[in-house]
Image: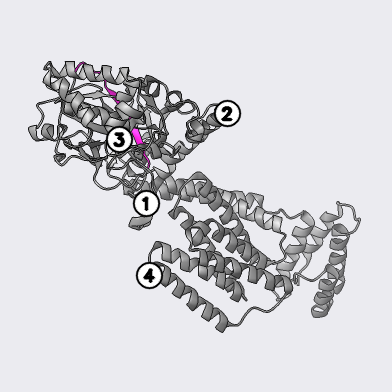
């Protein structure tokens, strides 16, 4: 039975890691477990040590070839999985079983290296229960499986108060407890630092969460939820890229407005392996973890490779100072040979004169009159994307709308640039948190007007206001593919998703996001005015000590109570034990009495009478009142 429990512990620790291992190692480990199970089933002897040594060396060489090292996170996990499997084939003593259990415990922790979600945590709990049951089986090979599982669950339940106290009070550190390789984030989804036709269209097919927002009080209207991200000012053929004049600034390049409403909120940003942070236009504060640029982007000091939280304040209208002429010149640059029709149209407006506001109004009216169609399946276009979109196909996605509008504005002599980010979001009614998904990715335009500064113009909203005022599904033509949860007929699934989002957000905020700042805030709410390591250590010691005392008292209260007959019989054994005549655990009352009679013949009759009374009361039908006689005889018995 112990063999099967050790196999179960090994498989439980290995199975969640299969996707992280090279295919050859996953196959080798599976074969090894199957081999050990077959040997146990057929009651065959374990293989020789030389064979295991050869397989171990071959496996280590394979890991070295795969990762070019035997150290580090991935190579280390691979080696531990290999050792866990091979240790099963040499487990001949309880000491070997203990090594398997410890390896399984450690590998359970490594499940958190790649994913820290709630399902992974539940899988880890199940693995710990199975591994603890395997540990208990090493001390009692005859125990029933249900009893071992019940014992493991009870031990885990008893440890929960200690885990909770340690989690709340143990000093936190910023970042994860393990180092991650630089390429571990290469598959993360998010906005890029360039935009070409189809880039945002591909991103919008994803239902993945980009970030969550919790507003303190006032919430902007849906049409005002523009979450600013990368700003693109250079057009290189079909691709828009960041401007060469973009630079880091020590403070915000604009001033707050006394007349505009202010919105306070907290952003929980998912990792995307890029440096930018997202905020409502226009942020009036800069998070401590980041900085701002002269084109009003928020950047983190390093790529966002773990979930982060930051508090923000924003205003929809701010006061812009005079802009840098070099930046305005960059916002007017255009390739001279591309999009001749669009350049001709904008150039005609410029030659007729009029103010910038008048030319801007003509451009907006033109976009509206063209009856452009918003679609997730635009046709393929050549280098003249703006021409073909505005005059030929008239079908496109938000990057077509914004890019063509910026080209038109620059041709008309108005500085303009493309802004990418997210628009809108979905309010979760369960916890009143706004969820912004990758499918909310959007691109819009920004134009410079001399007396007003930078003004947001969303050409998509001009041609298809339903995309901004409602959602993506309301804007696209019938038949276009949509992300699953944006489609009609899935209300019940969306309701389940809202509940799951609320649970997952609480997990992210209070478990994964329980960083030093949140720990300090939480402890202050509990009454610690200035929590430091001395205060937390003292509180930790007092609470853990109290829990140990309480658990000890509970165990003493729960211990089996002896009946009066058994208590008197053990009293006699203790008295005789001082003479070296204590009762053996396997001795019955008559055998014990005969052994005492042989060593002390003068007491033979009395010890026989006491043994008969005990046997009659314990196993026979003597009345309970005979207990008093048993007590008197044992009290009077002197060895």
Secondary element under disc 3, as helix, strand or loop, is: loop
Tell me residue 472's x, y (percent). 42, 27
In 3D space, how far apart are the residues under numbered discs 1 and 2 (Cα atoms)? 33 Å
Q: Residue 337, percent across and down? A: 18, 37
| x 30%, y 27%: residue | 390
Q: Can see residue 474? A: yes
Disc nearer the start of the sequence (1/4): 4
Residue named by callout 1: 185
Q: Which residue is mark 2?
A: 492
Disc 4 and disc 2: Cα gap in Å?
49 Å
Query: Which of the two residues, 98 or 394, is positioned nearer the viewer here?
Result: 394
**CB-based contact (under 8 Å), mark 1 and mark 4:** no
Coordinates of residue 210 in the picture (x, y in percent)? 38, 38
Name the residue carrying label 3. Answer: 278
Which residue is drawn at the image coordinates 38% and 47% (left, top)? Answer: 188
Residue at the spot of label 4: 69
Q: Is residue 262 magenta?
A: yes
Residue at 84%, 66% in the rendered image: 611
Which quarter of the rendered picture does the N terminus lie within?
bottom right
Residue 150 shown left or right of residue 273 in the figure: right
> Label 3 vs label 4: CA separation?
38 Å
Q: Earlier in the sequence, mark 3 or mark 2?
A: 3
Graded by Cα atoms within 10 Å as few (under 14), some (14 to 19) or many (20 or more), the crowding at tag 3 reads: many
Disc 1 secondary structure class: helix
């Amino acid at each position: 039975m112990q063999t099967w429990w050790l196999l179960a512990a090994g498989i439980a620790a290995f199975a969640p890691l299969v996707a992280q291992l090279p295919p050859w190692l996953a196959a080798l480990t599976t074969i090894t477990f199957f081999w050990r199970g077959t040997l146990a089933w057929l009651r065959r002897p374990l293989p020789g040590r030389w064979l295991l040594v050869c397989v171990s060396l071959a496996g280590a060489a394979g890991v070295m070839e795969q990762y070019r090292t035997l150290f580090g996170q991935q190579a280390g996990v691979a080696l531990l999985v290999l050792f866990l499997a091979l240790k099963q084939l040499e487990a001949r003593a309880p000491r070997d079983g203990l090594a398997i259990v410890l390896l399984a415990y450690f590998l359970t922790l490594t499940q958190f290296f790649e994913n820290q979600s709630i399902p992974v945590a539940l899988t880890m709990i199940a693995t710990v229960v199975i591994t603890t049951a395997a540990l208990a089986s090493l001390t009692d090979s005859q125990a029933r499986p249900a009893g071992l599982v019940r014992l493991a669950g009870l031990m885990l339940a008893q440890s929960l108060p200690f885990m909770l106290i340690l989690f709340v009070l143990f000093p936190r550190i910023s970042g994860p407890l393990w180092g991650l390789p630089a390429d571990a984030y290469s598959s993360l989804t998010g906005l890029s630092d360039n935009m070409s036709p189809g880039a945002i269209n591909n991103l919008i097919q994803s239902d993945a969460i980009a970030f969550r927002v919790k507003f303190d009080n006032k919430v902007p209207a849906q049409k005002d939820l523009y979450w600013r991200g990368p700003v693109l000012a250079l057009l290189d053929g079909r691709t828009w890229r960041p401007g060469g004049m973009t630079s880091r600034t020590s403070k915000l390049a604009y001033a707050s407005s006394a007349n505009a409403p202010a919105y306070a909120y907290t952003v929980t940003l998912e990792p995307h392996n890029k440096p930018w942070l997202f905020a409502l236009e226009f942020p009036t504060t800069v998070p401590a973890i980041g900085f701002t640029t002269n084109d009003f982007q928020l950047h983190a000091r390093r790529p966002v490779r773990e979930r982060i939280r930051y508090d923000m304040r924003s205003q929809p209208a701010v006061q812009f100072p005079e802009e840098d002429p070099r930046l305005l010149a960059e916002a007017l640059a255009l390739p001279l040979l591309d999009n001749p029709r669009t350049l001709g149209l904008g150039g005609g407006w410029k030659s007729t004169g009029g103010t910038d506001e008048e030319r801007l109004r003509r451009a907006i009216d033109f976009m509206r009159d063209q009856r452009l169609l918003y679609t997730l399946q635009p046709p393929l276009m050549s280098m003249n994307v703006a021409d073909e979109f505005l005059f030929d196909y008239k079908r496109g996605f938000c990057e077509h709308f914004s890019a063509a509008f910026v080209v038109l504005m620059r041709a008309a002599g108005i500085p303009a640039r493309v802004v990418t980010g997210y628009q809108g979001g979905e309010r979760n009614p369960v916890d009143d948190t706004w969820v912004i998904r990758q499918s909310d990715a959007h691109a819009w335009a920004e134009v410079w007007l001399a007396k007003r500064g930078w003004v947001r113009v969303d050409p998509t909203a001009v041609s298809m206001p339903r995309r901004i005022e409602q959602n993506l599904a309301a804007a696209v033509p019938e038949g276009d593919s949509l992300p699953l949860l944006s489609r009609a007929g899935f209300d019940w699934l969306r309701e389940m998703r809202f509940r799951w989002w609320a649970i997952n957000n609480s997990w992210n905020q209070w478990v994964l996001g329980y960083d030093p700042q949140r720990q300090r805030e939480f402890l202050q709410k509990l009454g610690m005015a200035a929590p430091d390591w001395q205060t937390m250590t003292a509180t930790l010691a007092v609470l853990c000590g109290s829990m140990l005392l309480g658990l000890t008292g509970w165990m003493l209260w729960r211990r089996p109570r002896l009946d009066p007959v058994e208590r008197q019989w053990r009293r006699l054994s203790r008295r005789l034990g001082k003479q070296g005549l204590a009762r053996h655990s396997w001795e019955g009352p008559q055998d014990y009495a005969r052994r005492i009679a042989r060593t002390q013949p003068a007491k033979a009759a009395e010890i026989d009478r006491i043994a008969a009374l005990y046997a009659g009361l314990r196993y026979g039908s003597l009345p309970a009142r005979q207990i008093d006689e048993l007590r008197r005889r044992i009290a009077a018995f002197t060895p």
